[in-house]
Amino acid sequence: MRRQDFIDAFSSVVDDAVEMKMDAVVHAGDLFDSRNPTLEDILDTINILSKLKLRNIPFLSVVGNHESKQHTQWLDLFESMGLAIRLGSKPYRIEDIAIYGIDNVPRSKIQLFDYSKFTDEDSAQYNILVMHQLMLPFPFGEWDCEDVIRELPFDVHAILLGDYHRNEKIRVDRTWVTYCGSTERNSASETDARTYNIVTINDNGIDIGRRNIPTRDFLFIPVELRDRDSAYEMIINTIREHQVSDKVVFVDIYGNPEANISYNEIEELLAGSNALVTRIRDLRHGEEVKEDMPLEVSFSDPDEAVKREISKMTLTSGGIMIDEIVRDPAVPKTKVDLEAETRIGNLLSGIDFMRPETYMARKEEQTEDRTKIEGLADEKEEELGESELSIAEPSGEYSVTSETEKSETSEYVADQEGTGTTPAEEDVEKTEVSGPNENHPPEKKKVESPKAKQYNLGDYL
């Protein structure tokens, strides 16, 4: 239901724009809270944006930090469908108004931002810039509005901002700078009413007003505990003084730290009163706790701790591979997605899905230490004699391949992709020496041997 609250809030703004016959709807980034939104979120967004398209009201937007992907953005998808326009260095024109956009820029790259790519529209009377960024002189600013206004090759009359969830408006020199706020509450700290801005541009200049959005109530119930024996009764009576139905309820507990509380009973009471979401926050400081109480502190190698936990799971080779990629310091964070996609793609291309044992790591094998790989390698070298042992990098295949088998590798792979069968067993031979007895000397005999087993390195991590 909270997910639906976000959809309804966004939809209500679009409905207002249609009703008031606006010339455009400007969205300042983070259309989604994740770079991988659900199919439901995408379909609902398409339905809402379609209402604007039917009335020929353009939806103009930039990419926020929460939804940003490495390459093609979700906003590009909506643009290809004719539902949105991604703002950038070339302006979108509405009569004598030029609207530019800057997608979210990581903090480390702000100083390197290239302003020269922006083009100046000489015929535009007003220039508006849309950004998704924390900007100075607002709180938590990391990019100065004055720098942006000074560096751009045209006069900026208004900067419309996203990322900060409160509605704010100031003037920087002669330029209006404003945050419209978020359409729904993302946290308990966002106690102000949710809003959006209405920007009016005419011969008198630019006017920026705001309008409230009706959203679900957040109810905060403070309870101060004094008597430890009547703490639960105090909490229940305080909750019953409020109308909690269909609200997001926060019960904040203060006071005596010695009073024992059953959180389950409080949650059951609120659920029985039709509270939508319940959060119990125990804010007691515990002044009477002894300061000299001994603390148990343990130090552990994080990598070893992760290995122990992973050994308890039943992961496929791909799962183990992804864990290695994420924790590999040699793989930059920006390349994790690409590296995982490449390695998993290589792994999948060599899997026979008709044989689950080839890609499911057995739990008992996962608990083996990494050093078992070396022991296995030595053991196989002795068994295969002149055979060649190769353990590839995670992006390739892990196999033990003898000299005899090398010439058949391509045939085996093709067969595996086709019929899933192995080469004939008579094509692979090895020599075995029979033991001596009293009447006969040792003699050699040829025995048939199946193809050497493929060993997946991931099975032994």
Image (cartoon, rainbow, N blue to C red):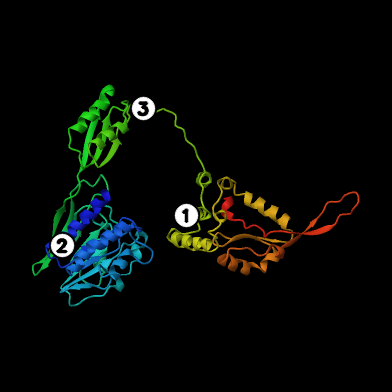
**With 126 as the anchor, is 143 left or right in this view?**
right
Q: Position of residue 372 (x, y in %)?
A: 63, 49
**With 440 as the anchor, is 290 left or right in this view?**
left
The one nearer the camera, 435 or 203, is: 435
Dot 1 falls on a residue whose secondary structure is helix
Q: Residue at x 26, y 23 (%)?
A: 230
Q: Which residue is mark 1?
A: 326
Dot 2 falls on a residue whose secondary structure is helix
Residue found at the very far left of the displayed protein: 204
Q: How many marks?
A: 3
Q: Residue at x 74, y 58 (%)?
A: 385
- Between the C-alphas of marks 2 and 3, the distance is 57 Å
Q: Position of residue 313 (x, y in %)?
A: 50, 46
**In this view, 250 is above or below 432:** above
Mark closer to the observer (2, 1): 2
Mark sitting earlier along the chain (2/1): 2
Q: Position of residue 56 (x, y in %)?
A: 18, 70
Q: Which residue is mark 3?
A: 289
Q: Which residue is mark 2?
A: 17
Mark sitting earlier along the chain (2/3): 2
**In this view, 139 is above or below 234:** below
Residue found at the very far right of the displayed protein: 439
Circle 2/circle 1 CB separation < 8 Å: no
Crowding at label 1, few (<14), some or many (≥20) Cα neighbours within 10 Å?
Answer: some
Q: Position of residue 377 (x, y in %)?
A: 67, 54
Residue found at the very far bottom of the displayed protein: 123
Q: Which mark is residue 36?
A: none
- Between the C-alphas of marks 2 and 1, the distance is 44 Å
Check disc 2 and give the amino acid type: Ala
Check disc 1 and give the amino acid type: Val
Check disc 3 and give the amino acid type: Val
Crowding at label 2, few (<14), some or many (≥20) Cα neighbours within 10 Å?
Answer: some
